Image (cartoon, rainbow, N blue to C red):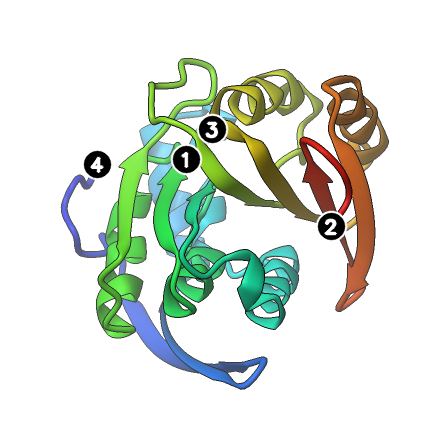
Amino acid sequence: MTNHGNQPIFAHSEESLELAGHSFRLCKLQDLDAALEHYVQLSAATERIPYYVQLWDSALALSKYVLLNPQLFCGKHILELGCGLGLPSLCASKIGAKVLATDFHPDNRGFFMKNVALNKLQNIEYRELDWRQPEQLGQFDCILGSDLIYEREMIPPLLQCVELYLAPQGCFIYADPGRAALQDFSSRLAKLGLHEELQAIEDMFVQIWCRTHVI
């Protein structure tokens, strides 16, 4: 069962969230075990694991950074990679950015679009995106990502997307809980000529990587 529509395929609930002075409504999964069982029966591939149904701490930290720095996002063209439920994208849209949210999982769209509708946002779109075969989406003022390198083999395709989609004066803002691959990922970003500023938000690392100089 693969969903390409705008409704979640699993039973879900709606929750309220207050973050940095802003209010959000989020559609979240009711029964994680049922979702896991569904994907185990469907395929043994790890890429089918439904990471997208959880609101991860790194996504919360990135969302807070976005809301606390509206001058970096208002009026800008933003891309989120591996968006899942999409809270960072919702935050960027709410403060005036034009947002394209992307995720690889074919069943993510329903949850994400439900969250867009719950928050009555207009300037936001969704695309399914495979980093290994990136589409021509254009370039963006800012790329957002959170906890994307939980497997080391994700680093090369993710770097490829950053190179392809980041505008000449753009920034890649990445939140991570301190995964084992983070140091390697950071070293490779530096080799691309990006310059880093590091912040800590809610016990998460938030890296701001810029083409030119640190913000």
Extreme residue toward the left, this view:
5
Q: How far is mark 2 from mark 4, CA to CA?
A: 41 Å
Counting residues from the start of the chain, the first of labels 4 and 1 encountered is: 4
Tell me the amino acid under the disc marked 4.
Thr
- 195 above or below 86? above
Q: How far is mark 3 from mark 2, CA to CA?
A: 35 Å
Disc 1 target residue = 40
Question: Number of labelled discs?
Answer: 4
Which residue occupies 61% across, 66% down?
Answer: 69
Q: How far is mark 4 from mark 3, CA to CA?
A: 14 Å
Q: Secondary structure at mark 2?
A: loop
Counting residues from the start of the chain, the first of labels 1 and 3 encountered is: 1
**x then y, percent, for residue 92:** 45, 60
Q: Residues within 10 Å of mark 4 (few under 14, many from 20)?
A: few
Counting residues from the start of the chain, the first of labels 2 and 4 encountered is: 4
Residue 110 visible to the viewer:
yes
Q: How far is mark 2 from mark 1, CA to CA?
A: 44 Å
Say the numbered circle drawn on residue 215.
2
Q: Is residue 42 left or right of residue 167?
A: left
Quick one: 113 or 1, which is closer to the camera? 113
Q: Secondary structure at mark 4?
A: loop
Quarter holding the N terminus is: top left
Tell me the amino acid under the disc marked 1.
Val
Would you identify the image quadrant in which residue 140 lies? Answer: top left
Q: Secondary structure at mark 3?
A: helix
Disc 3 target residue = 47
Are the residues at dot 2 and dot 1 in contact (C-beta closer than 8 Å)?
Answer: no
Say the numbered circle drawn on residue 48.
none
Disc 4 target residue = 2
Q: How far is mark 1 from mark 3, CA to CA?
A: 11 Å
Which residue occupies 33% across, 43% down?
Answer: 38
Q: How far is mark 4 from mark 1, CA to CA?
A: 14 Å
